[in-house]
Image (cartoon, grey):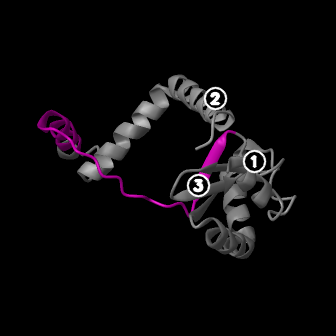
Amino acid sequence: MPDELQTWFASRVPKDWFAGPPEIMSDGEEILAGGTSTAARAAAQDARIDRFREETRDDRVRIAREAERHFRRKVGWGARCGDQMKLFTTASVPVMTRLRMPERSILDTLVAGGVARSRSDALAWCVRLVGMHQKDWIKGLRDALVKVDEARSKGPQN
């Protein structure tokens, strides 16, 4: 499915939007399309992304609606300029989890300390923190999962 998504968006996103093909990420609920802006000046990165967002809004909405009908998932967008990545129109998907008292206590401490507004925000904060500090490990795990998927696809079919 990743190749299908990449091909589908590459055929619809205007070539001048990004420096290269659109970058596509997806999970079971959402497809996130974005790319690197062609503007190079670091001081104008934020303004360039905001301008891109405004100038491409109608086309992004049209492409997203078509993709949502076709793939039956929400579509979010983002843009990168230099080292800054800005996401917009992304889904916030609820995730159910069961936590024991010691884990809930950690979330409650983050809420009481003003780090997060709610247990949900505190849990999202923890996930972002793991993502930042374990970036290489997470990437290695994702790369390994790609190899598992490749091996499964070459194996016997039911």
Is residue 134 within the magenta segment?
no
**57 vs 144, nearest the viewer:** 144
* Badge 3: residue crowd in 10 Å (few <14, some 14–19, many ≥20): some
Ranked by sequence position, the earlier of labels 1 and 2 is: 1
Where is mark 1, residue-wise? 36
Does residue 80 show up? no
Give coordinates of residue 142: x percent, y percent.
57, 32
**11 vs 109, nearest the viewer:** 11
Asked if residue 9 lies left or right of residue 50, the reply is right
**Residue 8 to residue 57: above or below:** above
Where is mark 2, residue-wise? 147
- Span colored in magenta: 83-110
Ranked by sequence position, the earlier of labels 1 and 3 is: 1
**74 vs 81, nearest the viewer:** 74
* Amino acid type for the residue under numbered disc 3: Leu
Q: Quadrant of the C terminus?
A: top right
* Badge 1: residue crowd in 10 Å (few <14, some 14–19, many ≥20): many
* Amino acid type for the residue under numbered disc 2: Lys
Does residue 54 show up? yes
Q: Kindly report the distance in space between the C-alpha atoms of the residues bearing marks 1 and 3.
A: 12 Å
**Residue 114 to residue 142: above or below:** below
Which label number is shown at residue 87? 3
Give coordinates of residue 145: x percent, y percent.
57, 31
Ranked by sequence position, the earlier of labels 3 and 2 is: 3
Q: Kindly report the distance in space between the C-alpha atoms of the residues bearing marks 3 and 2.
A: 28 Å
Give coordinates of residue 59: x percent, y percent.
75, 73
* Badge 2: residue crowd in 10 Å (few <14, some 14–19, many ≥20): few
